[in-house]
Image: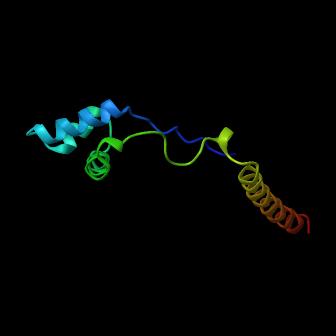
Amino acid sequence: MTRKRKPYKTFTKEFKLEAIRMMDESDRPSSEIATQLGIRRNQLYKWKEQLETKGDKAFTGKKGRPLKENQSETSKLREENKRLREEVEILKKAAVYFAKELK
């Protein structure tokens, strides 16, 4: 049985810019601001670094791993193949266990 992971939270460009502004202009610690916004403290620093390096081009578009429906056929088949190999290994171990139990 596989567990489904929680989907990633996505934030708008405006939210990220406002969070960075709060961190820069406030005298409160960044950890307190992050807690208030419901994000991790290091995420604020990552956003700030992205803004400093990319300027106006920061926070455009989606990045990261493609959604399931956008994955290529090959990667879907690889993932299924991996899962099936794991299931076969489990079944082999179960067969050995029950064969010993019957003796």
Closer-to-camera residue (60/84): 60
Q: Where is residue 50 drawn, in percent x and y?
A: 32, 49
- Image point (55%, 42%), residue name: 5
In the picture shown, does residue 56 fall above or below 15? below
Examine the image and state in which quarter residue 86 appears: bottom right
**Quadrant of the image containing the N terminus:** top right
User: What is the basis of the colouring in this image?
Assistant: rainbow
- Image point (18%, 35%), residue name: 22
Closer-to-camera residue (31/70): 70
Closer-to-camera residue (78/20): 20
Q: With 77 as the anchor, is 57 left or right in this view?
A: left
Q: Where is residue 63 drawn, in percent x and y?
A: 49, 46
- Image point (31%, 30%), residue name: 14
Q: With 9 as the anchor, is 91 left or right in this view?
A: right
In the picture shown, does residue 45 fall above or below 26? below
- Image point (85%, 67%), residue name: 96
**Quadrant of the image containing the C terminus:** bottom right
